[in-house]
Amino acid sequence: MNRLTDLEPRIAQVLAEYQTPGAAVGIVHDGEITELAFGVEDVTTGRPVTTDTVFQCGSLTKSWTALAFMQLVDEGGLDLDEPVRRLLPRFEVADARASARVTPRHLLDHTSGIEEAYGDPGEGDDVYSRMVDAIVDAPQVSPLGAVHGYSAALGYAILARIMEVADDKPWHLIMADRLFTPMGLRSTAARPEDVDPDRAARGHLIRSLEEGPFPTPVDHLPRAYGPGGAITSTAREVLALAHVFLHAGLAPNGRRIVSAASITEMLTSRVPIPDPYTLGHAWALGMVVSDWHGRTVYGHDGSTIGQNARMRILPDDDLALVLLSNGDPREGRHRRVFDLILEQLGMAGIPHLPEADPALALDPARYVGIYERPGTRFEVTAAGGGLQLHHDVDPVHAAIMGTPDRITHDLLPIDDTHFLMAAAGPLEETQTLALFDFRDGAARFLHTNARLHPRRA
């Protein structure tokens, strides 16, 4: 009997503590696959999750898109370091240098610095072409190639448009033709309309522990997020994606998806992440890189409005872990589930966040200010000898979730650049952020949850 199945009741207990309606866990270790299913796909129907249940992968989609892009690189049709403008002659943003020099590598590792200012491109098959046309006035959040700042939609939409021009077909068909079909994946799709509704998990949100989870009012992300967030899959088929990285470009069915050299390039071409504690210390090409007690770990997270995905790959241990769920996105859940698996395998768990240094004396004037990008505004203020972070909540989100318009967190210094952001309520967990790049005595950027926010005042 597979000893990992003994974990089932312990994982179920963790999911219950987080009021997670349903989840699927996938593990591959030394070639042996374990699949576990928990809870329900939808609290209103009570239909149980099975190992065939399809979940939304959110930003884990970026790993799929990056892999397909590398196929085109292998074929010689694309180059990671060729300016985008040579591939898309109409490509232009507000900054002349970025317009001329941004490359696919900048887009893959989130160092283009281009603002997510693409308007409403609609839901048609031309959505990524329209996004490229719409960013002619998009400003720079940061200078090209200077610093990591996660692009939720735009960067990978530009990559998708490059692929569409190269392959002369829409991105969702490229993904099917280049990845899903050759890998033998029958449950993975790149458009909501291609998902079997009888097998699809429904997203859930949670406003309070007393009320519990309720179905999300937003079934899926806008199509603009497609290449960066639209793929749906099962735990087993996400493990198939992990298999390609564990086995130098080979799918579980033996098909070569990309060259071994491309896998090496994806995992070793890295840029540092200013906040190294939330996701990892470096961003590769379609992957995040972490260090778990000396073990190098690759992976990607993903969240839609009510569903979540986590994939972690440990090459030295021939191990991959997947957790797909349809509820609360708190990080503690996936950490505890993965820790249970690692413990059962005799491995150390995921490293904890660092401790704050209460003896550290900081000059508040170096940090106070407003840090903002479209849709997100933070204000750092001095309070009682320390610092506080005030987050202006999106009005639509506040209305759905019943939260205040502004949430305040105490900032607890780890060092003179990194801070713990204390939880402000029972549905939050302590997070981390970085305030850095001091010019004229003040921080220029705030980096948290992989996003980069420039100082505005």
Image (cartoon, grey):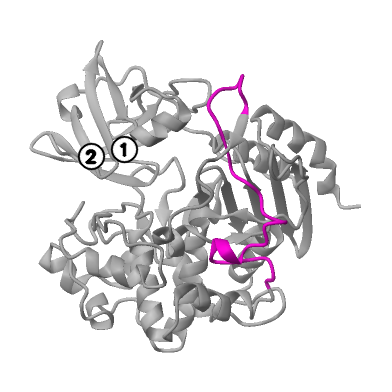
CB under 8 Å between callouts 1 and 2? no
Q: Position of residue 300 (x, y in %)?
A: 51, 54
Quick one: quadrant of the C terminus? top left
**Between 419 and 190, which is closer to the camera in this rendering?**
190
Residue that badge 2 annotates: 372
Residue 434 numbered tag: 1
**Between 180 and 258, which is closer to the camera in this rendering?**
180
Dot placed on the residue nearer the N-terminal end, 1 or 2: 2
Q: Residue at x 56, y 61 (%)?
A: 192
Q: Is residue 205 covered in magenta?
A: yes
Q: Position of residue 148 (x, y in %)?
A: 31, 53
- Judging from the image, what secondary structure is the residue with disc 1 in? strand
Q: Mark 1: few, some, or many residues within 10 Å (few <14, many ≥20)?
A: many
Residue 105 numbered tag: none
Q: Residue at x 19, y 32 (%)?
A: 370
Name the kind of residue labelled 1 in the image.
Ala
Q: Is residue 262 covered in magenta?
A: no
The magenta stretch is 185-212
Q: Quadrant of residue 384?
A: top left
